[in-house]
Amino acid sequence: MEDADKKFPYRCLPLVIANQYGWEILSTHHARASWDGTSGPNGLYVESLYGDGPLHCHSHFGEGVLTFQIPFLFKTPVGWNLMVRGPTNSPKDGIVALDGIIETDWAHSTFTMNWRFTRACTVEFAMREPICLFFPIRRGVLEMFRGELRMLKADREFKNKFREWSASRDRFVSGLEKGKPEVVAQGWQKDYMQTAKDKKPLAHPFANENVVDRAKTGGS
C-alpha cells in the first residue's frame, strides 16, 4: 500500500480496516523453504538463513505443507474461538496460508500455522515477516444468520438511496473520463468514508478489563 501510486489503496476504507483487524505473529528467523513437488515430508527442505535459537518451521504433514510451530497457549472466554489465518491482503508467490478455527475456550495445547505450496519452487520468509494472523470470533454466530434473496423494489427507501448513489457514481466516473478539472481535483468521492465517519463507533477500547469480564460472564 505504501508503494502504490499516490498510496491509492488507503482510499479504500474496507481494505484499511481489514488490514488492521487482528494480531500478527512474526517470523523469528529468515527462513528458506524449497518443495520438489512430491507428496512425502522429505520433499520439502527448510533452512535457516538468519536468526537466533531453534527454527520453529519444518515439513511435517507432507503434500508441500510448510508448518510453523506457534509457541504460545491462547485462552479465550467461553464460547469464543480464534480464527487463525495468514496475514490479510498479503499474497505470497508460490505458497498460500491455510485457515483454521480453534476452540481456544477449552483447548490446552498449542497449534501450528500451515502454509501450502502452490507449485514446486523456493520461497523465503524474512525476519519479522508476518506468518500468522488471529482474531476472536464468537462460536455459533454464523448459525444465527440466514441469507435471503430479495428484490430491490421491496424496500423503496433502500432502493432510492442506491439509485441516488449509482447515478452519482456514474456522473463522477464520466467526469474523470472527460478530464473535468473539478472532478479530477476531487480525486475520489469518499462517500463510504464520510458516511462511516458519521456513524457512532462500535469498537471497545483495547485492554478494557470490564469488557473482558462481561464476555466471560456472558453479560452485556
Image (spheres, grey):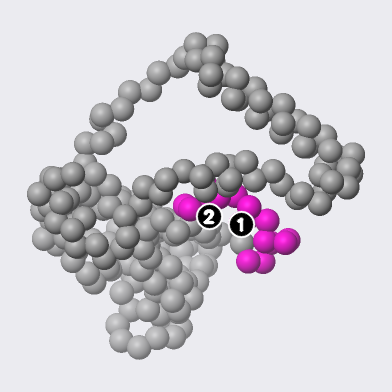
Residue contact between numbered discs 1 and 2, judged by CB atoms under 8 Å:
yes
- Where residue 18 appears, x then y in whole percent? 47, 52
Q: Which residues are magenta?
A: 2-18
Q: CA separation, marks 1 and 2?
A: 6 Å
Q: Nearer the viewer, residue 205 or 174?
A: 205
Image position of 140 with respect to 70: above or below? above
Asked whether the viewer can see residue 64, the reply is no
In terms of secondary structure, where does tag 2 sit? helix
Relative to 33, 170 lies left or right: right
Q: Residues within 10 Å of mark 2 (few under 14, many from 20)?
A: some
Image position of 168 with respect to 36: above or below? above
Name the image quarter holding residue 167: top right
Q: Is residue 6 magenta?
A: yes
Q: Amino acid at mark 1?
A: Tyr
Mark 1 and mark 2 lie on one chain; the one further toward the N terminus is 1
- Where residue 188 appears, x then y in whole percent? 71, 47
Q: Residues within 10 Å of mark 1 (few under 14, many from 20)?
A: some
Which quadrant of the figure contains the C terminus? top left
Q: Nearer the viewer, residue 55 or 119?
A: 55
Question: Which residue has dot 1 on it?
Answer: 10
- The residue positioned 67% from the left and 66% from the top of the image is 3
- Where residue 175 appears, x then y in whole percent? 84, 38
- The residue positioned 24% from the left and 44% from the top of the image is 138
- The residue positioned 81% from the left and 44% from the top of the image is 183
Q: Nearer the viewer, residue 55 or 132?
A: 132
- The residue positioned 21% from the left and 55% from the top of the image is 211
Question: Which residue has dot 2 on it?
Answer: 16
